[in-house]
Image (cartoon, rainbow, N blue to C red):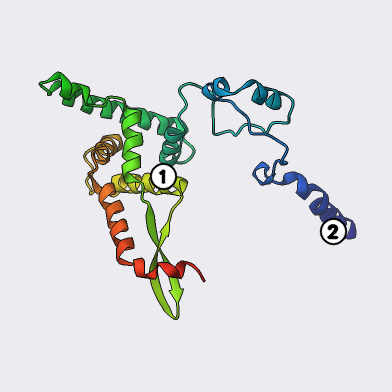
Amino acid sequence: MLVQNCSRIVSRIVLQPWTTSVRTLVWPKEFLDPVFRKEKQEAMGEEEFKQLAFSPVRAIRSNVSSSVFYDSTMFRLESHILREGKRQVARDLLHKIYAEIKQTQMEKMRSCKSEEEKAAIELNPIVIIKEALENMKPVVITKSIKRGGATYQVPHPVTPKYSEYLAIKWLLNSVKERPKPRKESFYVVMAREILSAYNNEGKVVKKKLDVHRQCEANKAYAHYRWG
């Protein structure tokens, strides 16, 4: 019995450090960030190449790629659509959203009479999605803070990364909360909402404006952010 207890203690002390996740590791300061994108490599000078060649470099993250088809914003959108680890299903849904947006814009372009109107219509679905996300991103949000036994909705600025997260979250929630019975597919409704946001319309843009109005109404409590 004593031998078993000692072996358990030794296994906890010795083996536990080796079972830590890689995410908890921190690279030393002298390690440089990898330059894996071709356009960034072409913009580098000779001195930067020498520094990168003779210095230790951090390992590239698993969620980035040097492929010409890789887009970081679309990858994050795909990751939010992802459920139960089925990335191929999420990728197929994203491609269907691309096709639905492209088809809608093509039909809109065919209905135009002048060449100027046709030239003004954007057909690239990735550009449309990025501009739609920019229109959906909030600048400030409210957070609940207690002061003197009362709870106030205090305006807080948000970082660009968190702002994009909120925009994608609101977009997916607006699609999921559609009334039942759901006669239209997920990608059809999402493509329609993205096109509405591209034109500064739709549920998500309205939600962003409501949040901004709430922040404007509660700006008197902004000093509660500190202290």
Q: Residue 90 occupies which quadrant of the picture? A: top left
Q: Which residue lies at the image location 38% right of the left edge and 44% below the top edge?
A: 168
Q: Which dot, 1 or 2, sits closer to the camera?
A: 1
Q: Nearer the viewer, residue 80 or 85?
A: 80
Vertically, is 46 above or below 25? above
Vertically, is 162 above or below 198? below
Q: Which residue lies at the image location 31% right of the left edge and 52% below the top edge?
A: 208
Vertically, is 137 above or below 126? below
Q: Nearer the viewer, residue 31 or 166?
A: 31
> Residue 125 location in percent, x, y?
32, 28
Residue under circle 2?
Answer: 5
Kind of residue sitting beneath label 2: Asn
> Residue 69 location in percent, x, y?
45, 23
Local secondary structure at mark 2: helix
> Residue 188 location in percent, x, y?
26, 35
Badge 1 vs badge 2, beta-carbon distance below 8 Å? no
Cα distance between the residues tagged 1 and 2:
51 Å
> Residue 51 location in percent, x, y?
70, 27
Q: Which residue lies at the image location 41% right of the left edge and 30% below the top edge?
A: 91
- Ranked by sequence position, the earlier of labels 1 and 2 is 2
Residue under circle 1?
Answer: 164
